[in-house]
Image (tube, rainbow, N blue to C red):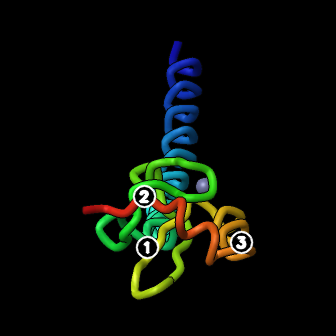
C-alpha cells in the first residue's frame, strides 16, 4: 500500500510539474496571440466610409483587412485581394461603393 501511495504521489508531483511548465509557457503564448490580434484589428468600421466591401459585397462589420484612400474617402476591404481587385479599375469600381450616410 505504501509503495502504491508513494508512486501515486510521485505521479501527481510529476504531473503537477509538467502542468506548471505548461502554465509558465501560456502567458507567453497569450501575449503572442494578443499582439497578433492587435495587428489584425488595426482597422475598425468607424475608420472607413463604405458600408460594404465593393469587391465582394461583404459588410465591413465582417472585418477589414486593408483600406485605401480614394477621393478623400477611406474604403475598407475584407482582404488584400479585394483591394487589389478594386484598384485594378478604381475609377469604375468606386461607383459601386455604398457609402455610409
Ligand atoms: Zn472582400
Q: Position of residue 35 (x, y in %)?
A: 47, 71
- The image position of residue 18, as x and y in percent, is 57, 47
Pick whichever of labels 2 and 1 is earlier in the sequence.
1
Question: Which residue does the numbered mark 2 point to in the structure image?
Answer: 98
Q: Are marks 1 and 3 in contact (CB under 8 Å)?
A: no
Mark 2 touching mark 1, by CB under 8 A?
no
Depth check: give the residue in front, 62 or 72.
Answer: 72
Local crowd size for mark 1, using a 10 Å CA cut-off: few (<14), some (14–19), many (≥20): few
Res 42 label: 1
Look at the picture and state if 83 lies above or below 7. below
16 with respect to 81 (left or right): left
Q: Is residue 15 above or below residue 67?
A: above
Ligand 1 within 8 angstroms of badge 3 C-beta: no
2 vs 1, front mark: 2
| Residue 53 shows in this picture | yes
Tell me which numbered mark, 1 or 3, is placed earlier along the sequence: 1
Is 71 placed left or right of 11 in the picture?
left
- For the residues labelled 2 and 1, the Cα–Cα distance comes to 22 Å
Q: Are marks 2 and 3 in contact (CB under 8 Å)?
A: no
C-alpha span from label 2 to label 3: 18 Å
Which SS class for mark 2? Answer: loop
Relative placement, left or right, of 81 versus 63 is right
Q: Secondary structure at mark 1?
A: loop
Q: Quadrant of the C terminus?
A: bottom left
Q: Which residue corresponds to mark 3?
A: 84
Q: Disc 1, ligand 1: is the CB inside 8 Å?
A: no
Q: CA distance from mark 1 to mark 3?
A: 19 Å
In this view, the residue in front, 101 or 44, is 101
Determine the secondary structure under disc 3.
helix
Mark 2 nearby-residue class (10 Å; few <14, some 14–19, many ≥20): some
Amino acid at each position: 500500500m505504501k509503495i502504491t501511495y508513494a508512486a501515486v504521489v510521485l505521479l501527481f508531483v510529476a504531473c503537477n510539474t509538467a502542468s506548471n511548465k505548461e502554465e509558465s509557457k501560456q502567458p507567453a503564448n497569450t501575449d503572442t496571440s494578443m499582439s497578433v490580434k492587435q495587428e489584425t484589428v488595426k482597422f475598425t468600421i468607424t475608420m472607413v466610409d463604405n458600408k460594404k466591401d465593393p469587391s465582394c459585397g461583404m459588410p465591413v462589420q465582417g472585418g477589414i483587412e486593408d483600406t485605401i484612400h480614394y477621393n478623400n474617402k477611406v474604403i475598407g476591404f475584407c482582404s488584400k485581394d479585394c483591394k487589389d481587385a478594386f484598384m485594378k479599375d478604381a475609377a469604375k469600381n468606386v461607383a459601386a461603393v455604398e457609402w455610409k450616410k
